[in-house]
Image (cartoon, coloured by chain):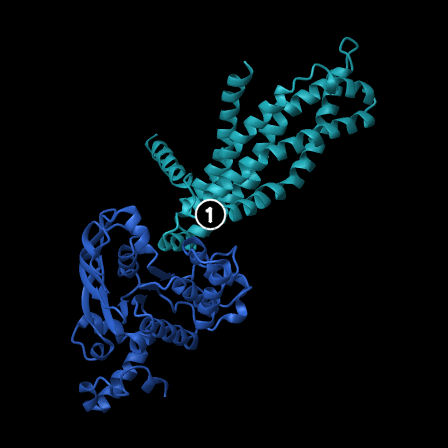
Chain colours: A blue, B cyan
Amino acid sequence: MIEIKNLTKSFEGRTVLHDISAVFETGKTNLIIGRSGSGKTVLLKNSIGLIRPDSGEIFYDGRKLIGMGKKELNILRREMGMLFQGSALFDSMTVLENVMFPLDMFSGDSYREREKRAMFCLERVNLLDAEHLYPPEISGGMMKRAAIARAIALNPRYLFCDEPNSGLDPKTALLIDDLIHDITVEYKMTTIINTHDMNSVINIGENILFIKEGVKEWQGDKHQIINSNNEALNDFIFASDLFKKVKKTESRKPEAGNDPDCPTYGLRPVTD
Amino acid sequence: MNESLHSLGEYVLLMKKAIAVPDRWSMFFKQLIREIYKLGVDSLWIVVIISVFIGTVIAIQISLNINSPLIPKFTIGYTTREIILLEFSSSIMCLILAGKVGSNIASEIGTMRITEQINAMEIMGVNSANFLIMPKIAGLMLFIPVLVIFSMFTGIIGGIGASYLDTQMTPSSFEYGLQFYFNSYYIWYSIIKSVVYAFLISSIAAYFGYNVKGGALDVGKASTNAVVMSSIMILLADVIMTHLMLT
């Protein structure tokens, strides 16, 4: 579990995050949504310690991130996996070498064991046939999958994804969403995903934090988001045709509003 | 002034972070071999080509400019050797390498910065400065004496070639001049200077690349700034080291 308490961050006098508090639960896909420039990436970068907040606290299963010693921080970082918006694969290394990189740096295993583990991760993301290719030689979706394989190589407890679907076609985006969700459940990770993809919200939004201009506006799950009364949230999500369709389906089946397991929730009714 | 001091402080802090015991020696040596090949071995051809031609030109120019019955012909070989050993193969060659190697380092690290590859390393708990910069500094410092020796050798070969082409001098007088009053310390002086230049080129370029903010245009700017700054520092270091080592 990752807990954020009263986080505030400013850049050159402009406050980007205002007193944000949130809890991101273990074994769930926690989504941070909001318009471009709303502070999602700054919140994520603060959460992983890439940026130091002006005030506030961040706890990783009770361990306080801010003020943590270098040694402790390095241990914590080895428990983190990160999927960057542009994948951030190392261009000079093959896909296999990329996945092996964290193992080469931190695992005491033999080369054969490290290679076996990397191949397992690549198999998990269905990317075995691309192991000897370099990042520029593979597609955007394959890059994301390779980055996921690298992120899970060390069995992380915390997975961070910055707009994992950006630049992907809707079908590949769904595959990536499902993969992240499955891995989160399988490895009991605390996963935080920055996104403004409404497909992702409906598909894997188990805990959603909505931010507007650096202020936490709303928090809930994908079942609650449709019927929320928050004006800013409704402005944001109903700009998407997908949500309008879901809402329309909802209004035709009033009983569905009380049933979280109703098929009108989630992506299935839309893709059908 | 304030900005320059700020940059100097940043540079010193980056070097402190970069020059540290590697997280994994095996990974460091793997990177070191890669960098020696990329920065050093790949620069060999340009060093050889430039040295041969400049050696030839130096010999021809001296022959033209000291064409006097009062000056012995072997002076052409002697002066060519002194220029190549003392300044050309170390300082001028390193200025050229600052362009080739410096821009390569700055653009590579800068691109890694803007594509978040450096952030990815930091998130994993890897000391990115140490992993990326130290093998480059060590690789160039280790290989630059080889480049300097190649440059000296091929520069003098170029001079000898000129003695066959130019009617003002003879190969035998040129070779006599090459051996005349030879001081082996000049070779060491040149190598020591080049090792210092190698540190300046790689560390300054790495600093500019590591601190890139923005996009592709900023990587280009960082690359240019790295070449300009390392060239200025090479010239400054040349003055200081010449004063310290030769006077």
The answer to whether residue B1 is visible is yes
Between residue B212 and residue A185, name the one nearer to us.
A185
Q: Position of residue A210 (x, y in %)?
A: 23, 67
Between residue A87 and residue B21, name the one nearer to us.
B21
Q: Is residue B193 left or right of residue A178?
A: right
Between residue B139 and residue B60, name the one nearer to us.
B139
Q: Residue at x 46, y 47 (%)?
A: B109
Q: Position of residue A115 (x, y in %)?
A: 49, 63
Q: Is residue B94 left or right of residue B207?
A: right
Quadrant (top left, top right, bottom left, bottom right) of the N terminus of chain B: top left
The answer to whether residue A17 is visible is no
Q: Secondary structure at mark 1?
A: helix
Between residue A34 and residue A144, name the one nearer to us.
A144
Q: Position of residue B87 (x, y in %)?
A: 61, 24
Q: Chain of mark 1?
A: B
Q: Residue at x 36, y 52 (%)?
A: B125
Q: Residue at x 44, y 68 (%)?
A: A121
Q: Position of residue B5 (x, y in %)?
A: 35, 31
Using the rendered view, name the quadrant where residue B35 is placed.
top right
Q: Residue at x 58, y 46 (%)?
A: B38
Quadrant (top left, top right, bottom left, bottom right) of the C terminus of chain B: top right
Structural crowding at the residue carrying mark 1, measured as other residues with C-alpha within 10 Å and reported as few (<14), some (14–19) or many (≥20): many
The residue beneath circle 1 is B109
In the image, what residue type sits under mark 1?
Ile
